[in-house]
Image (spheres, rainbow, N blue to C red):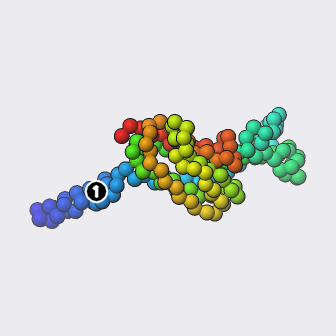
Amino acid sequence: MRKRAAYALIAFAMLAIGACGGGGVDPSAVTFDIELIEIKGATDGISAPEVDPATLSAGYRYKAPGDYDADNPAKWQVSTYMFSPGAMTIAKGDDVTLRMFGINGDEHDIWVEAPDGTLAVPSFTVNRGREVSVDFEATQTGHYKIFCGTHGPTMTADIMAIPS
């Protein structure tokens, strides 16, 4: 009976070590799965905005009353493009992979800026239904910013690099 308990304890310890980064997994290698999405909302319960939201950012869309639903002239819709997740955390020195998948929007022109404003990842394109992976090393602490030039200035995400 004690022998079985000892074997069970050893097996549990091996599983725990594997789950905590043992077994050859590089703890400084970080991968984020990021979806490029559009969120929409429609209403006929409140008046339409006075300013067309699409004039505020290429990331905003607006279908005015009458344009959105011909059968309901009071109904209107707004939408915005975004990265999901929009905030991530890494440690200085991490090797970061951003695996991006385009769900909405035919094309996204994306780049990543380091905390000092230099390019951590130069411009690349993600199209709808496509997955693109890019890599960079977090050589600085501070905020790395992901930008979509197609839907800016509002389609951004933030990666906070903390001291290792």
Q: Position of residue 30 (x, y in %)?
A: 42, 52
> Which residue is depicted at the point 19% across and 60% down?
10
Q: Is residue 46 left or right of residue 89?
A: right
Q: Is residue 76 visible?
A: yes
- Horizontal side, residue 99 vs residue 5: left or right: right
Viewer-proximal residue, 8 or 63? 63
Is disc 1 surrounded by few (<14), some (14 to 19) or many (20+) residues within 10 Å? few
Left or right: 72 as drawn, with respect to 106: right
* Residue highlighted by disc 1: 22
Query: In the image shown, does 25 or 17 lie closer to the viewer?
Result: 25
Q: Position of residue 76 (x, y in %)?
A: 81, 45
Q: Quadrant of residue 128?
A: bottom right
Taking the spot 65% from the left edge, 52% from the top edge, the residue there is 109
Rendering coords of residue 64 (x, y %): 84, 44
The secondary element bearing badge 1 is classed as loop
Q: Quadrant of the C terminus?
A: top left
Tell me if residue 121 comes above or below residue 10 in the rendering: above
Q: Quadrant of residue 141?
A: top left
Question: Is residue 45 among the parts visible in the rendering?
Answer: no
Name which residue type carries label 1: Gly
Residue for point 67% across, 40% down: 153
